[in-house]
Image (cartoon, grey):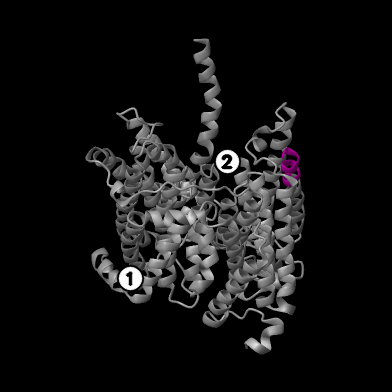
Amino acid sequence: MKAYDTLFAGLVLAASIVYEVMALWMPRGRVGQPGPGFFPVIVGAFLVLTAAACLIQTLAAGRHGNPAGEAAEDAVPAQSARQTGKTWLLLIFLVLYVFALQPVGFPIALTVFLVASIWVFGYRKWLPVAGIAVALTVISYLTFVVWLKVPLPLGILSDILD
Amino acid sequence: MDAFSGLLHGFAVALSPINLLFGFLGAVIGTIIGILPGLGPLGTMALLLSLTYGFEPTAGMILFAGIYFGAMYGGSTTSILLNIPGEAASVITVLEGYKMAKKGRAGAALAVAAVGSFIAGTISILFLSFMAPTLADAALKFGPSEYFTVALVGLMIMSRLQGGNFLKSLMMIAVGLTLGTVGMETVAGYMRFTFGQQALAQGIDFLPAAMGLFGISEVLVTAEEPEENISLQTVKFRDLWPTREEWRRSFWPMIRGSFIGFFTGLVPGPSPVIATMVSYSVERKLDKHGEFGKGAIEGVAGPEAANNAAVGGAYVPLMALGIPFTPAMAVVMAVLLIHGISPGPTLISEHPDLFWGVIASMYIGNFMLLIFNLPLVGVFANIIKTPLFILMPIVLLLCLVGVYSINNAIVDVWLMIGFGLLGYIMRRLKYDSAPLVLALVLGPMMERSFREAMMISKGDLTVFVTRPISATLITVGVLVMVLPLLLAALRPKSAGAQESA
């Protein structure tokens, strides 16, 4: 977990440097008339400092013979590959849902997404899974589209549902 | 309108059918999410925000007050019966509550927790009724420098009180502040950090961030954890009545917990959690029966009162100053903003229906919660048996549909998923999400106040330390930041001196 901790702090530090450089390019104005870049330069510098401090803290914790270090000693233990796989599967399904939202429409995309996520959480009887997914989609369609008038994309079903 | 007539007017508003219904729904949903470990009141409020769009803001505020208070009530149930805290604010209750259950006093512990929550909730709402209007009057004198320092000191205190690693909290505040600068800058219309994406011109809304960091990431983390089979201890209604001795021992802890909770609630950070810790340590110090650690009823009564009272306290800065001191209050603020109401010192005078209606509904909601958490405790406790394969997809559904309905924009869905992944990584590496979300909310306000303060003072930076309110706040902030460092520096010396002695 310490390697990930170091990597994360390092990535934030790198991003903060890019942010600060971009902020420095913006018109800063003067103290009595601050421009658009004034505040970003200050908060960017603050981020660079804190990210660098976090990175040093993680590195120092490892160097002092404490492989976990203060930063990582209370970190959650690594999960098994099978368990972590579920998280990545869910993330992939989430991304696919957003890609499908506009062309396919929310009712179909959501039903398929719900089937997939129920399956990820370990329930594999297909008929009840499909039933639950369809029921949840109908409830959300009635609540959000019909009742609250949220213009969720209906995609290929727009002719039928409009 | 004085407080008494305001309250009477508020009851007339709160007793309208729609407001009563929202109060009831809030109390039910709050109790349920309080019982279920994982999703907390903040995540739930963010998920349900879109459901409040079609109603008056008062109804939305009442719903969220019910959820926040309800989560504090419900959290104690599984802490006592199952040794599983439903909420972070109920972790302390496990220490004595579960031991009481093992001694066969689960009913008494549940009753004391519910009655303590009710007493504390009532006391804190009473304080809120009187304190918020007074503070709002005082806040009318606030200028941009005061607003800037309130937000700055709020973040400083939060970084200290959030718990966990101080540097990590500071870094998360910095991340939140930088994300708050994305989008079109309001004075000159300058595009900042949008990378040519028009979708980012409006900036990064904190709601996709909150839903991602608290909703999606919760599901992602839960997916990795094996599901446990839960066997629930049943409590009969007749077992719920504590003995005369238990009532006597619980009374003062409840009162002390109410005061501790309310005043802790005024402080930025996870105030309900801190309130329970402070109350527990106070009760432990005052213990005369030597039962702490073995199922002391004072250890349930005090903290359970404290976490409820902290909720009332947390409403004060939002209602009086228009500044949320916790991410949950930021979501409550969003209900107002969506309806074009700017929270601030004039909120109470300009929208008395809303303020007093919400206060009155809190009283009514507390009564409802007492009923849910005493006679119906067995029914609600069974909710913990809901399988994850039902619960988690519902959370995902509410996230995906709810986030789209904020601005009807697909970019918000992408942002939420991005924040969900970030939140998952942060949880694994023990970074707290709350400072990031609060800084994202307060950042744009801080920048606006800072720029106005500088223009008014013609670039005189001493304005933040020469005006009395700003100077006092800055002093408090610096003390909170520096004192722990000083104490830590002094501690090894005294320890060393003791050893040599």
Secondary element at tag 1? helix
x and y percentages locating residue B238 in the rendered image: 28, 49
x and y percentages locating residue B300 in the rendered image: 37, 41
Residue A6 figure quarter: top right
Residue at the spot of label 2: B164
Q: In the rendering, which numbered label is found on residue B14?
A: 1
x and y percentages locating residue B118 in the rendered image: 32, 53
Mark yes or no: residue B410 visible: yes
Residue B356 figure quarter: bottom left
Q: Label 1 is placed on what type of residue?
A: Ala
Q: Is residue B455 left or right of residue B315?
A: right
x and y percentages locating residue B79 in the rendered image: 45, 45
- Comes first in the chain, label 2 or label 1: 1
Q: Label 2 is placed on what type of residue?
A: Gly
What residue span does the magenta drawing correspond to? A1-9
Residue found at the very far left of the displayed protein: B244
Secondary element at tag 2? loop
Task: Have a look at marks 2 and 1 and say if they share a chain.
Answer: yes
